[in-house]
């Protein structure tokens, strides 16, 4: 009986330890690699349900990395809507994060339209990138925190 209790205690502690494992975050340069793309309804800035894992990943990243004082949300859109839609999509991501407890002052949504292509297809060039812009209040590498994009509306506005 004692052996059974000890075994169950060990298994419970092992399972509990796995449940408390911190998420793993991967960066490429200063950009956070997302587990899935941030998806929107075609031609709109309306996030789809499929975007939830990526949004939760960004929130977890900011929760775990409190020294990141500014995260740039870069909207990239090729084709219809271009610049304006890229700004609206970056703002939609920021709004979701703020609604889920992220400090609005840590987010900088901006639109890049089609100015920073990442591939040869429209799909590869229509995306949201999540980039560390400042650590502990200092811009990374002395670069402008906006990354050269057009700032969207402040995520702190209601």
Image (tube, helix red, strand yellow):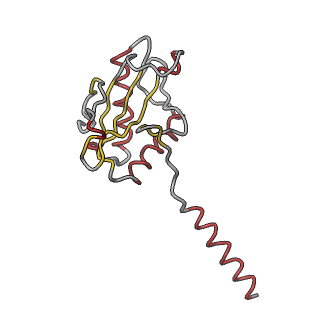
Residue drawn 38% across the image and 37% down it: 131
Residue 61, image x and y in percent?
Answer: 43, 48
Q: Quadrant of the N terminus?
A: bottom right
Residue with the most extreme bottom position: 2
Q: Position of residue 33 (x, y in %)?
A: 49, 38
Could you say which is closer to the camera, residue 44 or residue 106? 106
Specify the quadrant of the image occupied by residue 13. bottom right
Q: Quadrant of residue 12?
A: bottom right
- Horizontally, residue 92 falls left or right of residue 5, namely left
Residue pictured at 27% horizontal, 34% vertical: 143
Q: Position of residue 63 (x, y in %)?
A: 39, 52
**Where is residue 101 drawn, in percent x and y?**
35, 49
Residue furthest to the top in view is 80
45 to the left or right of 134: right
Residue at the (32%, 39%) spot, across then down: 133
What residue is drawn where x is 51% and y is 57%? 22
Image-based side of 121 in relation to 142, left or right: right
The one nearer the camera, 88 or 72, is 72
Q: Quadrant of the C terminus?
A: top left
Q: What is the total number of numbered labels drawn onto the structure image? A: 0
Looking at the image, residue 73 sits to the left or right of residue 138; the answer is right
């Amino acid at each position: 009986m004692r052996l059974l209790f000890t075994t169950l205690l060990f298994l419970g502690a092992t399972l509990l330890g796995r449940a408390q494992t911190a998420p793993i975050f991967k960066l490429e340069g200063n950009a956070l690699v997302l587990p899935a793309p941030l998806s929107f309804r075609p031609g709109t800035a309306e996030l789809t349900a499929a975007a939830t894992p990526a949004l939760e990943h960004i929130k977890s990243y900011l929760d775990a990395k409190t020294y990141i004082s500014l995260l740039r949300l870069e909207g990239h859109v090729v084709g219809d809507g271009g610049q304006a839609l890229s700004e609206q999509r970056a703002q939609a991501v920021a709004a979701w994060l703020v609604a889920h407890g992220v400090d609005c002052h840590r987010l900088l949504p901006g639109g890049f339209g089609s100015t920073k292509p990442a591939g040869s297809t429209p799909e590869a060039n229509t995306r949201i990138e999540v980039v560390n812009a400042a650590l502990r209040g200092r811009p990374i590498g002395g670069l402008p925190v906006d990354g050269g994009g057009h700032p969207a509306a402040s995520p702190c506005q209601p």
